[in-house]
Each structure stands twice: as structure tokens, then as C-alpha cells.
Image (spheres, rainbow, N blue to C red):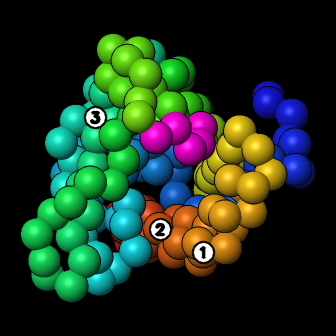
């Protein structure tokens, strides 16, 4: 487990009342992922989701029914099926350096008596970037997408 640095990291977690396999599947399937990754009513389009170390992770966002534009252009650093996904926008697919690095995220899934503990730890290079991400609405945004994920998989599990 990565140690939390409160000066540069933001974290959010919740228990999702569904099996870990269902939560993993919602993350690993691009069409499912598009349904919850961006707060509604905005929409997400997955251009690349190569769930392996060095694999590309590229999404686009459409707000207000407009054209899709850039959202994430990143790289998966580590993927342990059913347990952990680590991605960054400091690199793009194939380990290529990115133009505007901002964060690295570690998503962990763990069994919980009520389902799955979903935890996101988002690391930034400095406190200024961390604070900017918090002010941009990290907790509202990431909390909303986790809620959307929960609604999606809890409905399937129920």
C-alpha cells in the first residue's frame, strides 16, 4: 500500500454493496465505464482502455450535448485484476511523456462485509496541484462518479 501524503494526496472511499467482480467489470469494460466515469449529465467516450502496465487510457467528455473533447490522456502503470488499477496522466500509452502531467491515481478494491470497499488515492507532484484539484471539486466529482458506479453495480447485484 502506498503511504498517504496529506500535503499532495487526495483520497475518497465508500463501500459499494456489490461483489468485487461486479465493480471490477464496470471498470474494465469500456462501454460500462462510459456510463459512470463522468458526472451526469456530461457524457464519456472511451477511446483507449488497455488495462495493462504501459497501456493507453484515453477518454473524452461531452458537456451540455456538445462535441466530445479531451478528458484523460494517460497510461496504466499497474493493473492487478480485481484488486488495483494505477493510472497517470504524466505518461500516455506506451510510457510516452505527457505534455501536461497532473496526477497519478490508485484505485483499490477490497472485500467488505457489505460488498466492496472502493478507494481512490490521487497523488499530485506538489501541494499547489493538490489544492487546485480539491478546489476544482475533487470530492464532489469523484464522489459523484463513485455514486454512479455504485448505482450501476448495486442494481445488477440486487
Locate residue 109, reporting x and y percent.
61, 42
Kindly identify which residue carries mark 2: 145
Q: Which residues are magenta?
A: 100-104
Kindly identify which residue carries mark 1: 137
The part of the image, by quadrant, that contains residue 63 is bottom left
Is residue 147 left or right of 109 when viewed as pictured?
left
Name the one closer to the observer, 81 or 3. Answer: 3
Locate residue 102, reporting x and y percent.
56, 44
Q: Secondary structure at mark 1?
A: loop
Residue 153 appears anywhere in the view: yes
Is residue 147 left or right of 123 when viewed as pictured?
left
Quarter of the picture containing the C terminus is bottom left
Within 10 Å of disc 3 (Cα), the crowding (few <14, some 14-19, many 20+) is many
* 39 part of magenta stretch: no
Dots 2, 3 in contact, CB < 8 A: no
Name the one closer to the observer, 67 or 83. Answer: 67
Q: Earlier along the polypeptide chain: callout 2 or callout 3? A: 3
Kindly identify which residue carries mark 3: 49
Q: Secondary structure at mark 2?
A: helix
Dots 1, 3 in contact, CB < 8 A: no
**In this view, the mark in front (1 or 3):** 1
Is residue 10 left or right of 109 when viewed as pictured?
right
Locate residue 139, reporting x and y percent.
65, 71
**Up-down relation of residue 36 to residue 74 (above or below):** below
Q: Residue drawn 22% across and 48% down?
A: 46
**Up-down relation of residue 62 to residue 90 (above or below):** below
Q: Secondary structure at mark 3?
A: strand
Mark 1–mark 3 Cα distance, whole angstroms, equals 25 Å
Q: Earlier along the polypeptide chain: callout 1 or callout 2? A: 1
Amino acid at each position: 500500500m502506498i503511504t498517504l501524503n496529506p500535503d499532495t494526496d487526495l483520497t475518497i472511499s465508500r463501500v459499494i454493496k456489490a461483489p468485487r467482480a461486479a465493480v471490477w467489470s464496470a471498470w474494465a469494460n469500456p462501454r460500462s465505464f462510459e456510463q459512470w466515469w463522468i458526472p451526469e449529465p456530461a457524457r464519456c467516450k472511451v477511446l483507449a482502455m488497455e488495462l495493462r502496465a504501459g497501456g493507453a487510457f484515453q477518454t473524452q467528455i461531452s458537456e451540455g450535448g456538445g462535441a466530445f473533447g479531451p478528458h484523460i490522456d494517460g497510461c496504466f502503470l499497474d493493473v492487478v485484476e480485481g484488486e488495483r488499477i494505477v493510472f497517470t496522466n504524466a505518461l500516455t500509452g506506451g510510457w510516452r511523456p505527457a505534455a501536461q502531467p497532473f496526477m497519478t491515481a490508485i484505485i483499490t478494491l477490497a472485500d467488505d462485509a457489505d460488498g466492496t470497499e472502493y478507494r481512490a488515492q490521487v497523488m499530485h507532484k506538489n501541494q499547489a496541484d493538490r489544492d487546485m484539484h480539491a478546489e476544482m471539486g475533487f470530492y464532489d466529482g469523484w464522489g459523484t462518479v463513485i455514486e454512479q458506479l455504485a448505482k450501476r453495480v448495486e442494481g445488477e447485484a440486487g
